[in-house]
Image: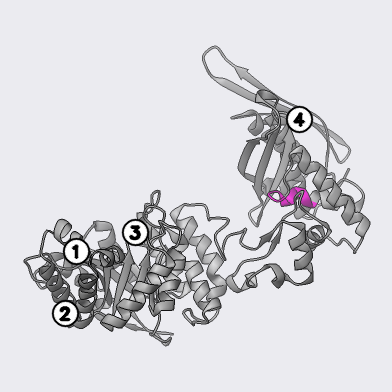
Amino acid sequence: MTTENGENGQSAVRDDRDDSFHVFDTTLRDGAQREGINLTVADKLTIARYLDDFGVGFIEGGWPGANPRDTEFFARARREITFKNAQLVAFGATRRAGSTAAEDPQVKALLDSGAPVITLVAKSHDRHVELALRTTLEENLEMVRDTVSHLRAQGRRVFVDCEHFFDGYKANPNYAKDVVRTAHEAGADVVILCDTNGGMLPAQVQAVVATVLADTGARLGIHAQDDTGCAVANTLAAVDAGATHVQCTANGYGERVGNANLFPVVAALELKYGKKVLPDGALAEMTRISHAIAEVVNLTPSTHQPYVGVSAFAHKAGLHASAIKVDPDLYQHIDPERVGNTMRMLVSDMAGRASIELKGKELGVDLGGDRELVARVVARVKERELQGYTYEAADASFELLLREEVEGRQRRYYRTESWRAIIEDRPDGTHANEATVKLWAKGERIVATAEGNGPVNALDRAMRVALERIHPQLAQVELTDYKVRILEGRHSTESTTRVLVTSTDGNGEWRTVGVGTNVVAASWQALEDAYTYGLLRAGVEPSE
């Protein structure tokens, strides 16, 4: 893959891959319309770099001229990014009714963006032409023809998005096909059929795409929204019917419920269809890219997203684990490493011996083929989960339990004498939270008191005061998340409480669990496990 300088300073790509199939990403435009996403120019530049690293062929950057942010993005992208794999695409509309493309200011803004490729949105539903554009069906065709021809004459590659195509095809199939045919004959490289309202199903998409392809001779693409939960399936159905251009967004971001998700579409094309749509080695970066983009848009990565979610290759049932122990392919449709993910074994009350053995191997704890030991661990996990503990979400607490059974002793770096937390309400409406812990560590009795913005925070601070002098490694440990759940079974303030704590030492993170009849007691258990595991990670030998 090599890069050349294109027109107007825009970096362009001489793509050594076959141009017969396109992966087109529209995260920076359509994906940014998701509720809760508000991208800065810097965010858009960062995401563009990730997408280029991933190897998509086209990155739609936005609508230059429509708002200052998108105009600035194209200007900065020209200066700051040398694309290795992708071409930058500017999005806009056909010229206004009653004008010419050469005179239309928004068409000029598309050219001024310097993007080597331009996507035009065109009306293909007759009612939208008459009601939204307030023009005639004939004028709409002329708007498509004139705008495409003008941009082609200026040396730009042109794609045309036929908005509301499938709904328009239902209402007036001949006119919808006339729009496709007009765009194609005017010089559009690809005409994209858009399921703008997201109401189509795969069999319907396949039938329509096949018919339009046969009747128009145009090169077709697909743009699917996910309102029926079928955007990925609809995209692949269009490919089955002959579409050679797919438009997607990273993690399925988009308006309403979203768009076709880039990652499962690309994975299906590469792994199921055998199409070479990414550079060598790029597919193995998919999980990293997915999560990195989620961080930029400030949304938690979906744990259950196909291929790239942390649960995509997680196995919980004992029956599955028994089979996976023999051959992982028996319960996995692909090797997770092919998409940069990993297999995970979840330990729960559904676990059997195989689950425990595989989890022990994953954690680096040698069970030595001891069936009696494994049976004890299984029984203990089931008993603890009956009390409200959950180990599938708390690997660190499970590893401590497992090591305790293997080593025949509890791994202790200190011994708790007592702890207490005090909440003080004052007449002026303010509150004070104070905690005291009494510990024994390395033969020394330590009493520490601290204040916090709540009883749990006060306990955490007191625990740090008590332990950091003896174990300075804990200075690197930080609590990053804290979750409380009231478990079913008892009512009101008598309910059992479960606390999950996430901690990090800067090099990795771990989760611990505590259960008790009140939130403070449950939190203390989770905190004890968190610091014990932090010392285990640091290679400290137990002293108690």
Mark number for residue 437? 4
Of 294 and 503, nearer the camera is 294
Which mark is in front, 1 or 2?
A: 1
- The numbered mark, 4 or 2, whose residue comes first in the sequence reads 2
**Tag 4 near tag 2, CB within 8 Å:** no
- The numbered mark, 1 or 2, whose residue comes first in the sequence reads 1
| Dot 1 alpha-carbon crowd within 10 angstroms: few under 14, some 14 to 19, many 20 or more | many
Q: Is mark 1 on a helix, strand or loop?
A: helix
Label 1 amino acid? Answer: Asp
Residue 242 drawn at (x, y percent): 39, 80
- The numbered mark, 1 or 4, whose residue comes first in the sequence reads 1
Residue at numbered disc 1: 126
Does residue 412 lie above or below 293 as drawn?
above
| Dot 2 alpha-carbon crowd within 10 angstroms: few under 14, some 14 to 19, many 20 or more | some
Residue at numbered disc 2: 149
Q: Quadrant of residue 481?
A: top right
Q: In this view, does 488 lie to the left or right of 273?
A: right
Tell me the distance, in whole angstroms, between the alpha carbons under discs 3 and 2: 31 Å
- The numbered mark, 4 or 3, whose residue comes first in the sequence reads 3
Label 2 amino acid? Answer: Ser
Q: What stretch is highlighted in magenta?
A: 392-399
Label 3 amino acid? Answer: Val
Label 4 amino acid? Answer: Val
